[in-house]
Structure formats: structure tokens, C-alpha cells
Amino acid sequence: MSAIFKREMRAYFTSPIGFIFVAIFFIINGALFSYFTLQAGSSSDISNYFLLVLFLFIILIPLLTMKLFCEERKQKTEQLLLTAPISLIDMVGAKFFAAYIMFAGTFLASAVCNLIPYFIYCEDVNLASILGNIVGILLIGGAFVAIGMFVSALTENQFVAAITTMAVIAFLLFINFANAYIGSAPVRVVLSWISIFARFFDFTYGILNLSSLLYYASVMFIFLFLTVRVYENRRWS
């Protein structure tokens, strides 16, 4: 498992993908934070910044996940993974942790760079809200990485994997806004239940809602499980 993890981490920095991801994240994230800090002034209300970071994931998460399995099929190395003396769970887990650590490390480094001057100059910092937002984004990022991995396992075309992942993430984020245009109460309940965006609001107030934590963990587990199942079918086909 550690060998695959190290190979995936190394691949992010021996190809342009890792540098592009970090550069785009820092530039856009820094610009957003600067804008909303100026808007907030001496206030501690920068919740809109964290909300927009979620929508940034529509573009950024697919950059990390599109190659995870597509590249294996394209370079004909998939069979080496399938016949290696390692379980499929460990193989999928190693790739997931590599992509997730790349995401989480970049986000946390960016957050530290942004928040240190904010803590210094802001008169009234709502620490619970900031920590809640950070925890929520880390959980949602994990769910999106798992979704991107599953999509990558279904195709050998990185472009198709990226576009499909973008569509799925956008759907899960924007589905909450569709409720305003739907008259059926049962449909609205279902859409609210599966909406990743709707469940994030508790975190913006510094509330760690157990049901939301379980929901994000379940999304990660389900899509990682489905990815393992895809490769189980390939191994025996």
C-alpha cells in the first residue's frame, strides 16, 4: 500500500498536474479570501469565502482525480495493479489517501497563509465558525475525491473523467438551489437530503452535526466501495 501511495504522491510532482492544482488553488483562494476580508472589515463574518471555496472544487478536484485510474489503463499498467500482491482495498485506499492528502495539505497551507493575518487584524474572530468551516470543507473534499476516483475507474479518457466529475460535483452542490423551483414537498425533502451544500450550513456556524458527519463519511465509503467493486469485476473478467 505504501509503495502505491508514494508513487501517486510522486506522480503529482513529476507531472504538471500537482503544480497546476497548487498554483490555481493558492491564487484563486487567496484572491477570494482577500476580497471577503476587505468586505468584512473588522467583522469576523467571512462565511461567504468558505462557501465559494466549495464551488472552486468543481474545477479543482477533477484535476487531482482524473488520472488516478485512467492513466493506469492508458499506459497498460492496470494489469500490474490487479495482479500485484496487494488487496484491492489497499490499492484503492492508497490512491485515495494520496489524492486526499494533496487536496487537504494544499487547502490547510492556504488557510494558514490566509488566516494568520486575519487573526492579527480582525477585532472579533469567531473561532468556532472558522474551525467548523475548515472541518466541513475537509469532509466535503474527501467525499468529492472519492467520487472523482470512482468516475476515473470507469473510463480510460482523462478528459471524460474530469468533465463527468465536474458535472457530478456541480449537481451535488447546486441541487439545493433547485428546491426553490420545485412544488412537490417529497421531492424537495429528497433533494435536501442528498444535497452536500445544504448540510454544510451547520459547519458555517461552528456546529459539528453528527448526521452531516456521517453523511459525508458515508459518501466517501460508498464511492470507495464502488471503486473496489469495479476493479473486482475487472480482475475476474
Image: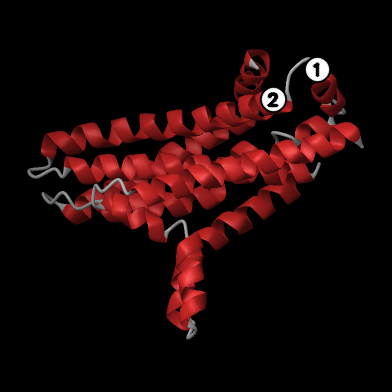
Judge by depth and name the residue closer to the eye, 153 or 23.
153
Q: Could you classify mark 2 by the number of other residues whose Cα lies within 10 Å: few (under 14), some (14-19), or many (20 or more)?
A: many
- On-image quarter of the C terminus: top right
The residue under label 2 is: 91
Residue 65 visible from this viewpoint: yes
Q: Amino acid at mark 1?
A: Ala
Q: Position of residue 2 (x, y in %)?
A: 62, 14
For numbered disc 2, what is the local secondary structure?
Answer: helix
Judge by depth and name the residue closer to the eye, 41 or 218.
218
Side (left or right) of 16 relative to 219: right
Q: Could you classify mark 1 by the number of other residues whose Cα lies within 10 Å: few (under 14), some (14-19), or many (20 or more)?
A: few
The residue under label 1 is: 84
Q: Position of residue 36 (x, y in %)?
A: 26, 52
Judge by depth and name the residue closer to the eye, 78 or 66.
78
Residue 66 visible from this viewpoint: no
Judge by depth and name the residue closer to the eye, 50 or 21.
50
The mark found on residue 188 in the picture is none
Residues under numbered marks 2 and 1 in contact, where contact means CB atoms less than 8 Å apart: yes
Q: Amino acid at mark 2?
A: Met
Q: Residue at x 49, y 82 (%)?
A: 182
- On-image quarter of the N terminus: top right
Q: Position of residue 44 (x, y in %)?
A: 16, 49
Q: Residue at x 30, y 45 (%)?
A: 208
Q: Position of residue 65 (x, y in %)?
A: 63, 38
**Gap in angstroms between the C-alphas marked 2 and 1:** 9 Å
For numbered disc 1, what is the local secondary structure?
Answer: loop
Side (left or right) of 226 relative to 83: left
Q: Residue at x 86, y 36 (%)?
A: 234
